[in-house]
Amino acid sequence: MEAKLEKIEYKQKWEKRETIYYYMNRDLKDLPLKLIDKKIIIRNLMENELEEYVDLVNTSLTHCPDPFVPMNLDFAKKWPLGQTLVAEVDGRLVGFLMFESRGKMGLPVQLGVLPQYRRKGVGTSLLLFLLNDFRNRGIEDIRMKVFKNNVPALTLYKKLKFKVYGLTLEE
């Protein structure tokens, strides 16, 4: 009987924690590149856009279910421009994707889209553009961490055939 109580208590603790992350991955075969919206310009962030970019990140992430730590200009200046994609619509930055690569592994780090541009293909276009670039550079393994309650992100990643391969609790 004691083992059952411990199991139930553990399950309750597990469910109450707010920082449960799914670890997801995807191979780079069969990318649905036709889903990239040609009206959305995807490119690297430029240095003269850093202030606009900080506003974009903070506005985008304030409206998402992940725990949020505001970005500041100092951090933005330290993150390599070549590891930040932005989505531009009608001359306005509307989305971003920060990433890293380590050898044969690609790591999408953080993706955000302004609330009024969500569900319009911006996040899909950013992520597919990055995955295609990773493939072209010979990167073979894509991994990311996603907050369990971030349903919009999980919906996007599942649509693009990412699979959950692990789970973790962070305090």
Image (spheres, rainbow, N blue to C red):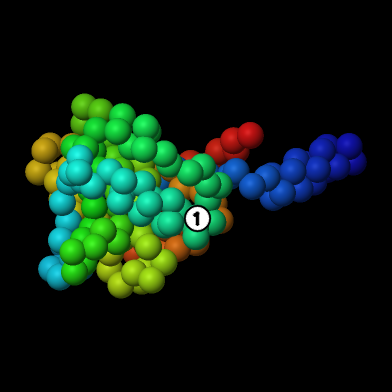
Which x, y percent locates residue 66?
A: 53, 51
Which x, y percent locates residue 33?
A: 16, 62
The count of marks equals 1
Which x, y percent locates residue 76?
A: 33, 37
Q: Mark 1 points at which residue?
A: 62
Q: Is residue 9 visible?
A: yes
Q: Quadrant of the C terminus?
A: top right
Q: Which residue is drawn at 19% across and 69% down?
A: 90
For residue 114, which quarter of the picture? bottom left
Q: Quadrant of the N terminus?
A: top right
Which x, y percent locates residue 121?
A: 28, 68
Q: Is residue 65 left or right of residue 75?
A: right
Q: Which of 151 and 8 is in front in this view?
A: 151
State the residue lying farthest toward the top. Answer: 103
Q: For label 1, count other residues whose C-alpha is less than 10 Å away and answer few (under 14), some (14-19) or many (20+).
A: some
State the residue lying farthest toward the right. Answer: 1
Q: Which residue is drawn at 37% across and 33% down?
A: 75
For residue 65, which quarter of the picture? bottom right
Q: Nearer the viewer, residue 113 or 6?
A: 113
Circle 1: element type: helix
Q: Which residue is drawn at 50% across and 55% down?
A: 62
Q: In this view, does 55 lie to the left or right of 9?
A: left
Q: In this view, does 111 lie to the left or right of 70?
A: left
Q: Can residue 30 be seen in this view?
A: no
Q: Nearer the viewer, residue 114 or 49?
A: 49
For the residue marked with disc 1, what is the amino acid? Thr
For residue 3, which quarter of the picture? top right
